[in-house]
Image: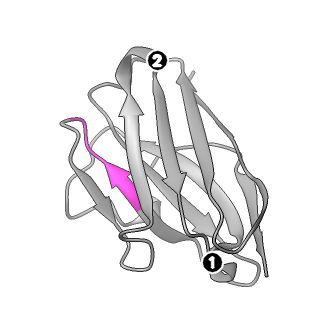
Amino acid sequence: QVQLVESGGGLVQAGGSLRLSCSASGHTFSSYGMGWFRQAPGKEREFVAAIRSNGGSYYADSVKGRFTISRDNAKNTMYLQMNNLKIEDTAVYYCAVDPSMTIWTMRIHARYPYWGQGTQVTVSS
């Protein structure tokens, strides 16, 4: 059974940094694509970043240059380093896995079959 557990969320002031982790179990994920999504109150879940099995990374325009996605296949863990956080980054952040990720599907949350429970990130002024 695939399980994803996020950690690292919290409260931070604007301009600060946080590092989210997504620990995966139940399968070896080195050949799978993985992604981060976020959902703010009253808004739809939106793509943040994705990383393919070959290490290729992709970002939403709103976080490009501020966030960095990475993965450690030996630890079955994915990370999201978030720098220069803005108030509009406040949301619940979810990690997800798509065994059949392509560059055309990675931004579509409905294409990911496996999800974590989410971790809250709150950025204050």
Badge 2 element: helix
- Residue 111 can be seen, yes or no: no
Q: Identify the residue position indicated by label 2 in the image.
A: 75
Q: Identify the residue position indicated by label 1 in the image.
A: 86
Q: Give the range drawn in magenta.
A: 49-53
- Determine the image quadrant of residue 74: top left
Front label number (2 vs 1) = 1
Report the predominant secondary structure element of the magenta stretch. Answer: strand
In which quadrant is the C terminus drawn? bottom right
Q: Position of residue 114 (x, y in %)?
A: 52, 41
Q: Position of residue 124 (x, y in %)?
A: 80, 76
Q: Does the magenta stretch include residue 115?
A: no
Q: What kind of residue is marked 1?
A: Lys
Residue at 46% x, 62% y: name it. 109
Residue at 49% x, 41% y: name it. 79
In which quadrant is the N terminus drawn? top right
Whether residues under marks 2 and 1 lie with C-beta atoms below 8 angstroms apart, the answer is no
Q: Is residue 52 magenta?
A: yes
Badge 1 element: loop
Indicate left or right for 36 with 33 as reference: right
